[in-house]
Amino acid sequence: MRGLMKELRLFQKNIELFLLSFPAVVYILIFAYLPLVGLVLAFKDYRYDKGILGSDWVGFKNFEFFFTSQTAYIVTRNTILYNVAFILVGLVFALLFAVLLNEIARRWIKVHQTAMFLPYFLSWVVISYIITGFLDHEHGYFNQLLMQFGADPVYWYNESRYWPWILVAVSLWKGVGFSTLVYYAGILGIDSSYYEAARIDGATKTQMAMKITLPLLAPLISILMIMSIGGIFRADFGLFYFIPNDSSFLYSVTDVVDTYVFRALKNVGDIGMSTAVGFYQSVVGLVLVVLANYIIKKINDENSLW
């Protein structure tokens, strides 16, 4: 009873904050927690006429669909390696651009922010048309440029060796603006007296970035890194489906778990199998988040998420 009264007093004291967070709480409940009930389909042979409760239990049979497939290793490897590359490359460039934004004149900063942030709002469908404009075999800009220098045109959508670089570059171009603004906001929160003291001592801009900016951004970097690691087993479907134009010649380097499940669901139409893979992705993501937080906590307790 005493605990309940304490909670009620806490609620009355912070009622404005609870009301502000109410829409987000409802959103999370509807789109994050309620769908968890559907995970039961991963262990059932779902039939529309029997419904969720009436469908037969099949144990881990739906998981065999993914683990026994010939391409399971390829899509797992592609999903993990691409996400590792996106995290590392995105982190380096976002920090670099955030530091550079902090150094340029204030009157130009809105222009740079807008130019960097604009690709973030473009859909993958729109970006796929832009990429096609560059990589089209007959009229693409790159092949036109190659032919002007006497080189043979490249069948970009048939040559898999180029696509790891292309996908990383496209992902970086689309998402680096958002990450840069997050780190730039973190830099703006650093006490300017640190930089003034460093200037008086004769520190260069590189020294200030390495000795002041990066150490003070370490907690923010750690939190964003942990959140990114949680999604390391969940690929961006739009990037891997629309940008390579779903070319079968490129599946060895562009096929990831999400595109594989989509094609399997489109061809086979088994909801239980797709739910099983989604469940597998979520479990691996949870394990990675807990593991990453544990490692960071061992290194520096203050930088961990919990």
Image (cartoon, rainbow, N blue to C red):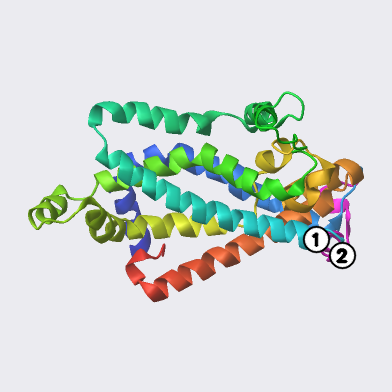
Tell me the quarter of the image containing the N terminus.
Answer: bottom left
Amino acid identity at mark 1: Ala
Please state the horizontal and vertical placement of residue 112, each as a whole percent of the image.
Answer: 37, 30
Please state the horizontal and vertical placement of residue 191, each as a whole percent of the image.
Answer: 17, 50
Kindly indicate whether the residue at mark 2 contacts the one at mark 1 (C-beta within 8 angstroms). Answer: yes
Residue shown at 70% from the left, 56% from the top: 78
Instruction: Identify the element where label 1 is drawn.
Output: helix
Question: Residue extending furthest top?
Answer: 139
Residue shown at 90% from the left, 43% from the top: 267
Give the answer, above or below, for where 282 lies relative to 103: below
Which quadrant of the view contains residue 280? bottom right
Q: Can the viewer see residue 231 in this picture?
A: no
Please give the range of residues in magenta. 50-68
Which quadrant of the view contains residue 60? bottom right
Amino acid identity at mark 2: Thr
Direction from residue 18 to residue 61 in the image, left or right: right
Is 143 one of the magenta-colored residues?
no
What residue is shown with label 1? 72
Question: Residue extending furthest front?
Answer: 150
Q: In the image shown, does 57 or 63 lie closer to the viewer?
A: 63
Please state the horizontal and vertical placement of residue 235, each as a whole percent of the image.
Answer: 65, 49
What residue is shown with label 2? 68
Question: Residue extending furthest left?
Answer: 200
Direction from residue 27 to residue 16 in the image, left or right: left
Residue shown at 72% from the left, 50% from the top: 161
Please state the horizontal and vertical placement of residue 189, each as a whole percent of the image.
Answer: 24, 47
Label drawn at residue 139: none
Q: Can the viewer see residue 142 in this picture?
A: yes
